[in-house]
Amino acid sequence: MPARKDFEPWDLKGHLGWIALIDVEYEPERFRFRLVGADIVTGLSRDSSGMYLDLVYGPEFYETAIGSYRWNLEHRKPIRAFGEMVHARKGHIRFESLDLPFSSTGREIDLIMKRVHYSSAISLAEKE
């Protein structure tokens, strides 16, 4: 598993607006948006940078919102996810994401980098 120090932001220059960095805390388990890229902020009409996910998402959507992060923690591998942004109350937006776990110790995941892509669920339905 790579460490955050193994990555330089300019390596991902064309993707930075679509990347979110999520800090992982243990005991108790919590996830915090360290940084949310500008294109994600525009798509969701909100900037959650610096906020804990359990405060961003209500209890009805929290487990859905963190599902891929829990998978990262359990399997210690990247995961691709896709669906509709119902947990952000934006069900008209479809997403595809890649969540990449990072570890500064090589054992415990302390950061997840998410690369997101959005498309309109409405335009996709019209094409079908």
Image (tube, helix red, strand yellow):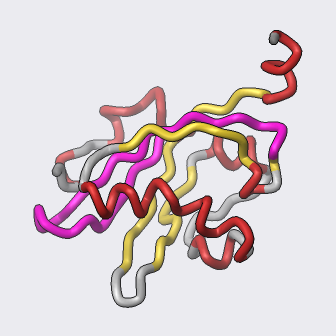
Outermost residue to the left: 106
Going by the image, does 44 lie left or right of 12? right
Q: Quadrant location of residue 26?
A: bottom left
- In the picture, the quarter occupied by the C terminus is top right
Viewer-nearest residue: 1 or 9:
1
Residue 71 shows up from this direction: yes
Query: Left or right: 127 with respect to 114?
Result: right
Query: Residue 126 lies in what quarter of the image?
Result: top right
The x and y percentages for residue 47 are 69, 59
Where residue 94 appears, as percent x and y from the top left, is 71, 35
Give the vertical position of 117 relative to 28 (above or below): above
At x 77% / y 37%, what residue is drawn? 93
Q: Identify whether 107 is placed above or below 7.
A: below
- What is the magenta range? 91-115
Of 32 and 128, the residue lying toward us: 128
**Observer-nearest of 112 and 61:** 61
